[in-house]
Amino acid sequence: MITEHSTGHEAGAITGISVVVPHYGEPAQTQELVRQLHAQVDIGVPLQIIVSDDLSPVPFPPMRGVTVVRRENNGGFGAAVNSGVEAAEHSHLLILNSDLQLDTDFVSRLCTAAQPWQPAVCAPMLVGLDGETQWGGRRFPRNRHHIIEWLTPLARFRPRLHEAVGHDTRCVEGVTLPVDWLVGAALLIPTDAFRSVGGFDEAYFMNVEEVDLQRQLRARGIPSVFLGDVQVRHEGGGSSDSARRVRWVVQARLRYARKWNENPRALRLGLRTASAVNLVFNSARRLRGRDVQPLAIWHRELSAIRPTEPAS
């Protein structure tokens, strides 16, 4: 967790941007993002680039115009960002995943769209490399969102279940509006506001930490605003294998439920019940000749749901 200290800038005004990019894995993707940041035009304010190396197996190499922060242990997304923020010098943070593709005017357009809303957490519209929206604006998580998302029989209906799994379907191209929370792939946040709550909760290894942060900031009068006039392309998928990602997601959601009184026991029971439904569904698919392993999937799902820390 980071310590609170002021940037010394007028509250609300975007007078400079400190970009923080967590790095883990092969450096090529992060290096390409840094090159895209160096190519930004017409920003109008100073731009600082910070790469936070989360004890990557392939360390991030020195690059011109980049402050590299090297962590001594692998703490996950939130911890890496917090370490990077310790080196931030400007009024606003721009937290970016390394798997983004930026237009040369991305930062200037983001700042222009975000300035009237300051102080606020702001984010652009996220689109996949296929051009489809990734629903960057979301509703605050409820247990039912996660349980519906866990049910394999509903997978084919996902394109019609966005609100049921917590996507805010008002968040489309050209629309700007306050939302419950914004996906953390690209977030513009006032530096002092981020520091005032101690940064990201590092107990979330990966996933949900941005929801937790935005709930804390909301309590301090800092809204989250979706900027649909600005877009960024997001590959997604992360730098880890899918089984580990699923477990991180589930454990983060359980922690969030404990922390924000969303009944983690009910969530765990609902997920286990959904896994039993998935077992029956996948067994029927196998009987019809589909290449699925119902028991193996069931065991993986139960492993992801199994708690790793005592319930509080």
Image (cartoon, grey):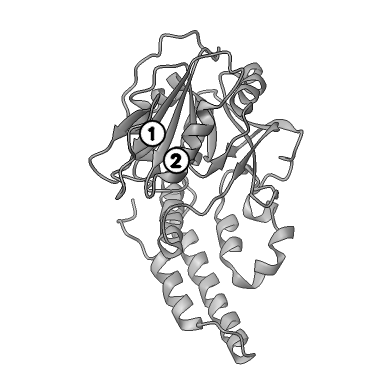
Task: State whether residue 269 is above or below residue 253.
Answer: below
Pick the front one: 178 or 296: 296
Task: State whether residue 242 is above or below residue 188.
Answer: below
Of the residues shown, which amino acid type is indicated by label 1?
Val
User: Where is residue 70 drawn, in percent x and y?
Assistant: 28, 36
Left or right: residue 17 compared with residue 240: right
> Which label number is shown at residue 193?
none
Pick the front one: 150 or 36: 36
User: What residue lies at 49% left-to-right and 33% top-to-bottom?
Assistant: 35
User: Where is residue 188 drawn, in percent x and y?
Assistant: 54, 28
Mark 2 or mark 1: which comes first in sequence?
2
User: Where is residue 96 drawn, in percent x and y?
Assistant: 49, 36
User: Where is residue 42 drawn, in percent x and y?
Assistant: 61, 17
Quadrant hosting residue 240: bottom left
Tell me how far mark 2 sits from mark 1, CA to CA: 8 Å
Please identify, in this view, whether the residue under mark 2 or under mark 1 is nearer the observer. Answer: 2
Location of the N terminus (image quadrant): top left
> Which label number is shown at residue 51?
1
User: What residue lies at 62% left-to-right and 29% top-to-bottom?
Assistant: 104
User: What residue lies at 39% left-to-right and 49% top-to-bottom?
Assistant: 26
Of the residues shown, which amino acid type is indicated by label 2?
Thr
- Residue found at the far left of this picture: 72
| Label 1 element class | strand
| Label 2 element class | helix
CB contact under 8 Å: marks 2 and 1:
yes
Left or right: residue 59 compared with residue 48: left
Q: Which residue is mark 2?
A: 30
Pick the front one: 64 or 128: 64
User: What residue lies at 60% left-to-right and 55% top-to-bottom?
Assistant: 145
**Mark 1 residue crowding within 10 angstroms, few (<14) / some (14–19) / many (20+):** many
Q: Is residue 187 visible?
A: yes
Q: Is residue 260 visible?
A: no
